[in-house]
């Protein structure tokens, strides 16, 4: 298990570790280690039994909705000041989700609370981790939304990177998985800016955007420019399956976020079409 996985397990079962170590304190260092080990496995067992609670689609969607805006606020404030671009992005997400009334107010409150210095990420992300334990695609969608928050003002800072690393650790996302998503997101942002479709945009000026747009199109698909046709198609199909709106909603993505998933598939489709057209 890599350091991310170990860290996530330690954070998840820290109560059992600490209590076990305290109980074993009288036995010296070895007693503490033994106690911590017993505490860890007991905590894991208890959570396994208690965690057998039924995570209905509605519960998972609520956990995802709240965590999205809490973490968005945390990421935006990570470097000390929330930029105008980050505020505009948060508002744009709410608008694209067609949030109104109580739902929009809830999103605003979560975003505001996430900006607080003493905000506890673990408390918010633990329910989401349990809800999405077997749903890697929905976890990926979550981290994509947070990466977009960090990238919206040009790139994520070291402070934003630390928050995102903590988010990944708490959700059980490996560093390798995060880096792959981050690379695709950066390419997606450049591809969109160069005229590629997605996020409500049209094909626009992509045809005249030159090699930069083409390079970013490959990046959106997560493949090198010299990949063969089979690898290209496999990458495309995998990404389309991972971002299929109906599948994501069925596994915990809030209904209101279906539009975000649709925009993702549009971006992927536009990148694939651009590459295919170039290769003809």
Image: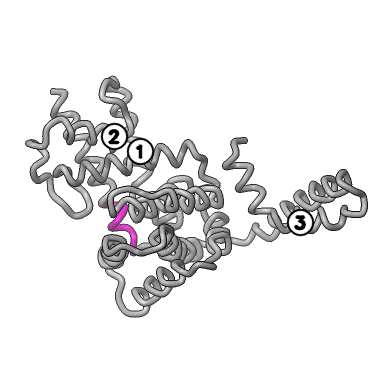
Q: Are there few (<14), some (14-19), or many (20+) residues within 10 Å of tag 3?
A: some
Callout 1 secondary element: helix
Along the horizontal axis of the image, is 146 left or right of 88? Answer: right
Which residue is at 63% across, 42% downward? 6
Q: CA distance from mark 3 to mark 2?
A: 44 Å
- Judge whether residue 198 can be spotted in this image: yes
- Judge whether residue 247 can be spotted in this image: no
Residue contact between numbered discs 1 and 2, judged by CB atoms under 8 Å: yes
The first of marks 3 and 1 along the sequence is 3
Tag of residue 18: 3
Rendered location of residue 215, percent (x, y) = 22, 31
The first of marks 3 and 2 along the sequence is 3
Q: Are there few (<14), some (14-19), or many (20+) residues within 10 Å of tag 2?
A: many
Q: CA distance from mark 1 to mark 2?
A: 7 Å
Q: Which residue is mark 2?
A: 219
Q: Magenta segment: does it hold 257?
A: yes
Residue contact between numbered discs 3 and 2, judged by CB atoms under 8 Å: no
Tag of residue 80: none
Q: Between tags 3 and 2, which lies in front?
A: 3
Q: Which residue is mark 1?
A: 183
113 or 68: which is nearer to us?
Answer: 113
Rendered location of residue 210, percent (x, y) = 12, 32
Segment colored magenta: 256-262
Callout 3 secondary element: helix
């Amino acid at each position: 298990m890599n350091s991310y996985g170990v860290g996530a397990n330690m954070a998840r079962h820290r109560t059992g570790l600490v209590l076990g170590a305290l109980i074993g304190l009288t036995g010296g260092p070895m007693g503490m280690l033994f106690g911590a080990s017993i505490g860890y496995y007991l905590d894991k067992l208890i959570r396994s039994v208690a965690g057998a609670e039924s995570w209905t689609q509605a519960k998972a969607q609520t956990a995802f909705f709240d965590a999205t805006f809490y973490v968005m606020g945390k990421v935006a404030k990570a470097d000390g000041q929330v930029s105008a671009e980050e505020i505009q992005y948060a508002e744009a997400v709410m608008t694209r989700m067609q949030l109104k009334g109580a739902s929009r107010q809830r999103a605003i409150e979560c975003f505001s609370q996430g900006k607080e210095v003493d905000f506890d990420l673990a408390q918010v992300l633990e329910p989401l981790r349990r809800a999405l334990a077997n749903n890697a695609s929905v976890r990926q969608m979550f981290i994509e939304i947070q990466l977009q928050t960090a990238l919206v003002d040009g790139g994520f800072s070291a402070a934003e990177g630390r928050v995102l690393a903590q988010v990944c650790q708490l959700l059980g996302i490996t560093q390798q998985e995060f880096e792959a998503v981050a690379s695709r997101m950066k390419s997606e942002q450049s591809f969109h800016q160069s005229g590629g479709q997605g996020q409500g945009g049209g094909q626009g000026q992509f045809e005249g955007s030159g090699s930069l747009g083409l390079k970013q199109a490959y990046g959106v698909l997560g493949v090198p420019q010299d990949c063969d046709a089979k690898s290209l198609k496999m990458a495309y199909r995998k990404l389309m399956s991972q971002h299929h709106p109906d599948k994501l909603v069925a596994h915990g993505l809030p209904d209101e976020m279906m539009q975000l998933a649709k925009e993702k598939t549009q971006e992927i489709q536009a990148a694939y079409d651009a590459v295919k057209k170039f290769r003809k």
